[in-house]
């Protein structure tokens, strides 16, 4: 199957994000961007650049909050969580590259709450796949996509950003 | 009770996939695993920035601190590590309870297992105690060695490696001197194994002949009996505590004489590289192995070691407990 070009997909995501905040433009100027390692951080950086939002963006590694620890152990290649702003009372724009089961976002929200009580979390995902296992839905999606059985999609980068298919 | 030195196969610490199940000794562990422990510990250090200084990895699990020998720092940092992983922690000072009433170690263990513990952190004055316990417990209980006799103190060695790596980077470029009571030191043994496995450029042992083990050559280090020569151009100086409680012979004329020849002072530290760092596993005997001005000076990383101890113990506890529960674990 042909995969979409990431830069045009990012354009779509940025304009959908702007549209999502069309009734509350001042809220968009006050959001704090948080990307999920690794792909979500690249997408968050692109959104910050296009919408001229403050940087550096926050980054989250949800490795210690995963729910499959007793099956998989700790994932290798952990990155650092860095939130260079207060979470308490903030409107967080939480960004990931791909959402499927929703378990990563569950873990991310649990981790965020350990840093404070955000006023609101808006969830943005470049790609949404079917297969949700938790009642978590993104507010803004670049592209809804279905994959053939046994395949998954991954964002690679950062230069250039590309989508690649992998066998599970 | 007297416990024989370890007789278990070296791979008792790992499962078939090479994952950590027990953490008893650095010897026999591959470099990749030691690096993974350091990487994991590094990422646990960031948790101190959050409002809630905990992660949920061991939520609902029970860690038992089983201390047959006195300890303040090691026990406190193991307790804090387990609590930051959200485990429930039980501290047992066995020296003053069951064993003094005649209960055997095996009976104590079986009672604790019946309380459904998931990990035992064991300190014992006999070499091989942690291996013995690992051979006796039911599967699915992780054993962490918090120091056994003169044999090993692997989490102390790993927190020292983390401290060195954070300040000095790559091990292959480093000259490291371990100074003092090598003979009685389980810390020194574990440090040598860790430094060798991680590929340190040069490891030196500096001590009077009476405080060197008889088979010191087998440790594969450069041995010095002169402190100034031993410290020349080193990047890292690790001082050891003079273990007076373990000395059962006339090994030293006096503490004063030991300090005169082997104490780390501003004057002797000047033989090391100007950017050398100074470490000590604690508790320190100020004025016996180290001068206060050095222990509290700008090159000292002694307080960093304590902070890194929590992160390393979180890494080892989480890896061993998860290693006991993953698919394929024995």
Image: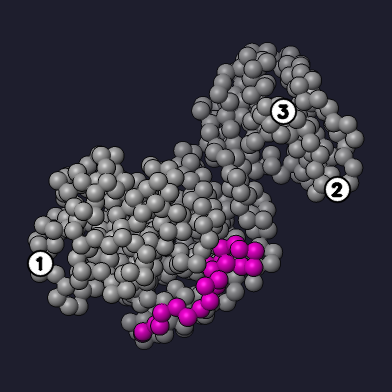
Chain designation of label 1? B
User: Quick check: A10 left or right of B324?
Assistant: right
Which residue appears at 71% of the width and 44% of the height? A103
Say which element carries label 2: loop
Assess disc 2: are there few (<14), some (14-19) or many (≥20) residues with their C-alpha within 10 Å of its C-alpha: few
- Can you say whether B164 is above or below A119 in the image? below
**Residue tagged 1:** B254
First to last magenta residue range: B1-22
C-alpha span from label 1 to label 3: 68 Å
User: Nearer the N terminus, badge 2 or badge 3?
Assistant: 2
* Front of the two marks 2 and 3: 3
Expressed as whole percent of the image width and height from the top left, the position of residue B110 reads 51, 80
Where on the picture, by quarter, is residue B255?
A: bottom left
Give residue A150's mark: 2
Expressed as whole percent of the image width and height from the top left, the position of residue B305 reads 35, 50
Say which element carries label 3: loop
C-alpha span from label 2 to label 1: 73 Å
Both marks 1 and 3 on one chain:
no
**Residue tagged 3:** A161
Which residue appears at 22% of the width and 42% of the height? B297
Both marks 2 and 3 on one chain:
yes
Expressed as whole percent of the image width and height from the top left, the position of residue B186 reads 34, 67
Whether residue A13 is visible: no
- Can you say whether B136 is above or below A17 in the image? below
Q: Main secondary structure of the magenta part?
A: loop
């Amino acid at each position: 199957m042909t995969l979409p070009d990431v830069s045009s997909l990012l354009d779509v995501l940025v304009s959908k994000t702007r549209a999502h905040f069309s009734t509350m433009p001042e809220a968009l100027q006050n959001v704090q961007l948080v990307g999920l390692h690794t792909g979500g951080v690249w997408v968050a950086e692109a959104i910050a650049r296009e919408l001229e939002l403050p940087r550096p963006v926050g980054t989250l590694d949800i490795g210690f909050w995963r729910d499959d620890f007793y099956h998989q152990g700790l994932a290798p290649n952990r990155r650092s969580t860095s939130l260079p702003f207060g979470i308490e009372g903030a409107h967080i724009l939480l960004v990931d590259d791909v959402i499927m089961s929703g378990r990563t976002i569950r873990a991310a929200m649990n981790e965020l709450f350990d840093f404070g009580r955000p006023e609101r979390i808006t969830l943005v995902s470049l790609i949404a796949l079917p297969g949700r296992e938790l009642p978590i839905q993104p507010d803004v999606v670049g592209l809804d996509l279905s994959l053939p059985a046994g395949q998954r999609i991954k964002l690679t980068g950062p230069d250039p950003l590309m989508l690649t298919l992998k066998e599970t | 009770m007297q416990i024989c030195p370890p007789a278990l196969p070296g791979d008792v610490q790992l499962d078939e996939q090479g994952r950590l199940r027990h953490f008893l000794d650095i010897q026999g562990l591959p470099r990749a695993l030691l690096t993974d422990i350091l990487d994991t510990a590094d990422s646990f250090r960031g948790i101190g920035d959050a409002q809630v200084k905990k992660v949920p990895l061991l939520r609902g699990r029970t860690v038992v601190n089983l201390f047959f020998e006195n300890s303040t720092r090691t026990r406190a940092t193991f307790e804090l590590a387990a609590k930051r992983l959200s485990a429930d922690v039980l501290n047992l000072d066995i020296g003053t309870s069951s064993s003094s009433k005649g209960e055997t170690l095996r009976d104590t263990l079986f009672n604790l297992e019946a309380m459904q513990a998931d990990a035992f952190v064991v300190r014992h004055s006999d070499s091989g105690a942690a291996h013995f316990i690992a051979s006796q417990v039911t599967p699915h209980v992780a054993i962490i060695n918090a120091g056994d006799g003169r044999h090993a103190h692997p989490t102390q060695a790993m927190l020292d490696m983390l401290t060195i790596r954070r300040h000095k980077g790559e091990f292959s470029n480093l000259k490291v001197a371990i100074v003092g009571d090598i003979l009685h030191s389980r810390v020194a043994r574990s440090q040598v194994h860790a430094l060798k496995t991680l590929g340190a450029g040069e490891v030196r042992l500096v001590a009077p002949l009476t405080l060197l083990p008889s088979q010191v050559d087998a440790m594969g280090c450069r041995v010095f009996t002169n402190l100034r020569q031993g410290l020349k151009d080193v990047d890292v100086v690790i001082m050891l505590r003079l273990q007076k409680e373990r000395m059962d012979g006339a090994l030293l004329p006096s503490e004063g004489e030991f300090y005169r020849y082997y104490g780390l002072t501003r004057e002797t530290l000047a033989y090391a590289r100007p950017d050398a760092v100074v470490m000590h596993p604690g508790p320190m005997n100020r004025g016996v192995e180290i001068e206060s001005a050095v222990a509290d000076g700008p090159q000292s990383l002694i307080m960093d070691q304590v902070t890194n101890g929590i992160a390393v113990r979180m890494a080892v506890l989480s890896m061993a407990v998860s290693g006991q529960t993953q698919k394929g674990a024995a």
